[in-house]
Image (cartoon, helix red, strand yellow):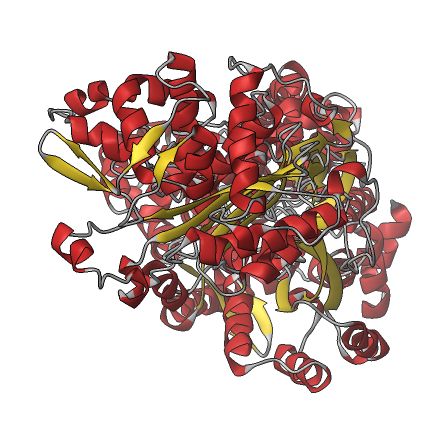
Amino acid sequence: MIGRRKTLQRLMSRPDADTPSRGVFTRRALVVLGAQMAAFGLLGHRLYGLQVLEGDHFARMAENNRVSRRLIAPPRGRVVDRFGIAVASNKVNWRALLLPEETSDIPGTLDRFSALVPIEARDRARIEREIRHKRRFIPVMLHDFLSWDDMARIELNAPSLPGVLIDVGTTRNYPFGPLLAHVVGYVAPPGEKDVAQDQTLALPGMRVGRAGIEQTQDGLLRGQVGAVEVEVNAVGRLMSELSRDEGQPGDEITLTIDSGLQQAVLGRIGDQSASAVVMDCRNGEVLAMVSNPSFDPSLFDSGVSQAQWQEWATDPRTPLINKAVAGVYPPGSTFKPAVAMAALQAGTLSPTDRIFCPGYLDVGGTRFHCWSRYGHGSLTLKEALKFSCDVFFYEVARRTGMDAIAAASHSFGLGTNLDIELPHTRPGLIPTPEWRRAHGQHWNGGDTIVSGIGQGFVQVTPLQLATYASRIASGRAVQPHLVRAVSSRLGASAEGSHWPALDMPEPFLNQLRVGMYAVVNEEHGSAPKARLDIPGVQMAGKTGSAQVRHVSRALRESGHFDSSLLPWEYRPHALFICFAPYDAPRYAAAIVVEHGNAGAAVAAPLARDIMTDTLTRDPSNRKEPPGQVVAEVEDFG
Amino acid sequence: MNFQKRLLRAEPNFRLLAKLWQVNWLYVLLICALAMVGYGALYSAAGGSSRPFAGPQTIRFAIGLVMMVCVALMSPRVLTRLAWPLYGLSLVLLVAVLRMGHVGKGAERWLVIGGVQLQPSELAKIALVLVLATWFHRVSYRRMVNPLYLLPPAAMVLVPVGLVLKEPNLGTGVIIGVVGATIFFGAGMRLWQIALLLLPLPFLGKLAYSHLHDYQKARITTFLNPESDPLGAGYNIIQSKIALGSGGMWGQGYLHGTQGQLNFLPEKQTDFIFTMIAEEWGYVGGIAVIGLLMLMVIGGMMIAMRSRNQFGRLLGLGIATNFFLYCAVNLSMVMGTIPVGGVPLPLISYGGSAMLTVMFGFGLLMSAWVHRNDNFGEGEDRS
């Protein structure tokens, strides 16, 4: 009707001039219409540019808008003992979550929920705060570690609990708690520095090993982060899943530790502040490594309270320190075999040489006392070890010199870095004149003398002592280690004695073994209490009592000196190193009882019990743990 | 035609029927076509559901359609008499919205009366067209040489423009001003008068910018460089362009526009409805909608030109221009050609107030068509 040609022709050719205003209007209306059509044309052109010419560019931007890559945390690898018993695992954590947008009556839902599963007032405040601050489609945690009963109640009442859902997460679980805390370590949420190094740690659920195996094997345990590509809407809400890469779960670390033996060793130690290391002296596997007192490693996952820190930090028995690798002690008389080896190798002592002990040795105007006031008389090396005569080793050290002693000690692993898979280890120290000079001090002859009985500046760790005993027993440079296998792939060292022989003649090593046998098994040996109660099996060992405070000559000569009357922190440490069976050594151990007073009285019986347990369990020759299997805790991943 | 003339001379009841016959049903069909496009788009904006947008909008459209036909049947005499009260009412409402209007996005735009949201600026536009058409209908083309005859209508334009700008609603204010100016132009304002008026315009523009609200300034600056604030004021523009661009030539398919369906597109059911259509239907669909809008404007202008009285002509011009401006401003806005300002796409965008006023406007246009041969109280122009 409107576009009829006749009308148009009339309008265009000759404006209908029934009034001047109509003519003017028609012309001007056509101008306006022309402008309007031109504007539409421009808009169409612009639309063509945006949609067709630049379409690809914007389509790509649209894809970026829409697709979001989300990372998924891989399950952390388990740590198991040598028999496959989990010592660090992931515990299933059933949680109740509330999706605020799916319930219209949040307080009512919370009330009904807490009638089924009680929520503490403090938690309730946190929940309400989170609901206020988070976006409505992000779930808020109501309750974690739900029991089956709790879950059943929630599921049963689901209709009255709109928006409540049950979800599964994991937390790190240490079934043995403090028993293996120093070895296994613990995990904690990553800090800002960790995240700066590795972005994937920002993922919720990711943990970083902060001590022990958890720290040194963190890279293996952590696994490979997976990713999902999801379609999200403008507010970041997940709409659908486009692709999924599950990632790689962390490796399972098999330890050399026998958790049953570990338990037995700790049982023997009781509540003493002490450390004990049991090793397979042929292949270097650490079978038990106890540092007492300990701590609960699971506390670190959620954060340790200030009060707890304070308690740990001020405890003189240092529960947080792994004494086996970071506790350094003067070795005392346990050092004597190393001194003897140095002398034998240097030729300053032969197995048949005799040295007379009058109870003291005067060197350069200083008198060095033997522990026996009356002296031991004339002694061979074997007798000197058996009685643990001080004067004999003063003299031997004097003849041999500190550099040779240090060299032999280092070969035995003392004062060296043993490269065990633990963080925060300390190397200890075998002092030399050179070391003294480097510190701007002069090395006195007397320093060599006291070093001969493992006093003075000499400092070693229990792990070094156990390694030392292993090397004496096996004659090989065994390295202690804790990782037996990674994801069931055995390490090379697990196979057996591939360690190189020590650069020491077998007859000399035998002298030390004979002496250590005498200590335990011969009449008047210094550690009769260490004798094994197993027919046909003998143990060789060496006692040590390391003074932590200088005992004045006057006090010693008064004859009334009794270190057991000193306050605890001034009493000498009690040490013992040993290996067994004597004729075919398989196990070696070192025990240090802090301020235990006397090695022979305190550490030797402990060593006997520990070695008895070790020989009874015989972990190196078994595939299955002996006796009753420790019930495994509900386990995940 | 004879039949129609007979009807017009017949009984009043039949005259009403005759007028109904006169309504330009082709144009009504065009309006319905656009409304259907709107229904489809709103259905998609709700993620494939007639609730909450498409259904209510259809009911409003039906009401609007009935209202349009009613208005179409009203004679110009009645309309010229209604013009002044309506204009007065719209001014009162504009003042009211300033005093107690509903605040949305820093601007006072809505008035809630009896649960109904009302945008007085929409009514003001129609009332202004009506009152200007009435004025210039009575003032002859010859007398317009005298600028004194231009002063009262100039005031009629400036008062509502000022009130709307104060809301502050820049987009609608400019549209009202331009509609007014177009009617002046169509009514026969002399070219020298226009030239004289345009001279101080740059100066006025500068003055106006200094009085803009911060959010309006932000729109202008982000328009010039939208990437400067991608998540803030520039977000709408960028997302709209992304959605348009990802539509490509043939579109992503109905109900499958990712940007719109995933809510990246802001206000997709109102201001950015065209973006949504063009994302899902592509350039082809976008051009089709623009074509429909063009037909609407052409039709409106032709109706205006066919009228034999100045009132009908100016009414038609005003309504068509108003419709055009709405479309042009909205389309430019979603394509990132002019700064964003809450101007809906008529007949398609979701919103009751705009729908009813647009349909009221079309009713006036239709009245101009039905009564195109009427002669009444025109100024002394006849030669």
Write down the quadrant of residue A454 in the picture.
top left
Q: Is residue A91 above or below residue A450?
A: below
Extreme residue toward the left, this view: A365
Residue closest to the eye, B236 or A442: A442
Residue closest to the eye, A253 or A352: A352
Image coordinates of residue A420 in percent, x first then y, are 53, 31
Residue for point 47% across, 58% down: A602
Image coordinates of residue A533 in percent, x first then y, are 69, 54
Residue for point 50% across, 46% down: A525
Extreme residue toward the bottom, this view: A115
Q: Please indicate, yes or no, whether residue A105 appears anywhere in the rendered image.
A: yes
Residue closest to the eye, A148 or A126: A148
Extreme residue toward the front, this view: A378
Please state, as top left, top right, bottom left or bottom right, where the N terminus of chain A lies in the image. Answer: top right
Residue closest to the eye, B272 or A443: A443
Image coordinates of residue A204 in percent, x first then y, are 59, 48
Q: Is residue B4 above or below residue A21?
A: below
Image coordinates of residue B85 in percent, x first then y, are 49, 69
Residue for point 12% across, 36% down: A366
Left or right: B156 with respect to A110?
Answer: left
